[in-house]
Amino acid sequence: MSAAFSLEGKSVLVTGGTRGIGRAVSLVFARAGATVLANYVRGQAAAEALLAQAQKENLRITVFRADLTAARGLDELEAAVARAGDLHGLVHCAATGIHKPFDELTLRHYDWTFALNVRAFFDLVKRLLPRFAARAAIVAVSSQGALRAVPAYSVVGASKGALEAFARHLAVELAPRGIRVNILAPGAVATEAWNAMPEAGHRLADLARRTPLGRLVTPEEVAQAAQFLCSDAARAVVGQTLVVDGGAGIPV
Ligand SMILES: NC(=O)c1ccc[n+]([C@@H]2O[C@H](COP(=O)([O-])OP(=O)(O)OC[C@H]3O[C@@H](n4cnc5c(N)ncnc54)[C@H](OP(=O)(O)O)[C@@H]3O)[C@@H](O)[C@H]2O)c1
């Protein structure tokens, strides 16, 4: 691997880091030399499976359970990061959402979704700011729903739009302090998140068929793009949205 893409010596927090795309980010980053703190909240089995994989490959990954929508969870995670020393990267993969048409959505659904997807990111960055080392990188994981209408996705899409706008403002404010902020927007990736989507099987097959690449992108491919954004190879990339969707978003 070219040294510019290496994450050797870097310490990175990955929220939602034990499952789906976040799990791939944790593994890809650790294989590139990073020390990874992978946050999760409910999926104990997934956290243990990641630890077992890390042990097998001799990777520096630890897992940390904390609910990012609760002040206590954020306090505990902040303390865990502080114990680990300087932080060189944050990848905010954790997300949630209620997948229903607008008529069926309530303010509770709205608050639940925004609490993790946007508010937790705001609070985390604020809390971790003093911990970031020089040349640190933050990646906010968004989705195509930030820009385009997706069935039963309005509240999640709106939260991702807010996340992206917030990340761009942060990019401008934090770049002079040596912290780069970027956005990573995957296309559809077949993870457990799709279990909550209406007609998931049919929609994934249709998306794969309509993707110029001829298939869906994988968690590893998204994770490698995150690696680029957190590496020195991306040292001049600030406030951008990197789309990893196999060309699915190109209007034809
Ligand atoms: N899959 C796709 O097609 C797709 C497409 C575009 C963008 N994305 C984005 O990519 C990211 C990862 O997606 P995914 O499909 O891998 O999701 P996923 O498998 O559903 O994983 C979601 C993660 O968020 C964590 N989480 C949920 N609530 C939390 C809370 N209150 N505090 C802390 N962590 C919490 C979960 O932890 P537990 O494991 O403990 O429950 C889990 O690790 C998300 O931001 C998603 O919006 C996904």
Image (cartoon, grey):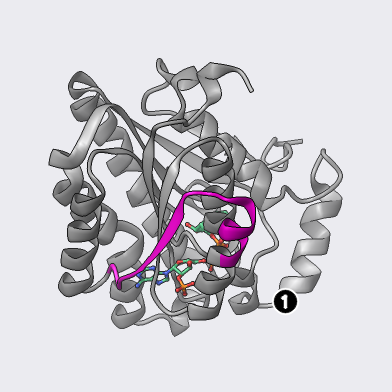
Q: For residue 76, which quarter of the picture?
A: bottom left
Residue displayed at 29% across by 79% down: 107
Q: For residue 246, which quarter of the picture?
A: top right
Residues in magenta, as a range: 52-68
Residue 202 is left or right of residue 10, and the answer is: right
Residue displayed at 81% across by 53% down: 208
Kind of element beneath mark 1: loop
Q: Nearer the viewer, residue 79 or 58?
A: 58
x and y percentages locating residue 197 in the rendered image: 62, 74
Q: Is residue 127 magenta?
A: no
The residue identified by callout 1 is 199
Q: Is residue 54 magenta?
A: yes
Residue 206 in view: yes
Location of the C terminus (image quadrant): top right
Location of the N terminus (image quadrant): top right
Residue displayed at 72% across by 37% down: 247
Residue 124 is left or right of residue 228, and the answer is: left
Position of residue 43 relative to residue 95, above or below, is below
Three-letter code for the amino acid on which mark 1 is drawn: Glu
Q: For residue 172, which quarter of the picture?
A: top left
Position of residue 153 relative to residue 235, above or below, is below
Residue 122 in view: no
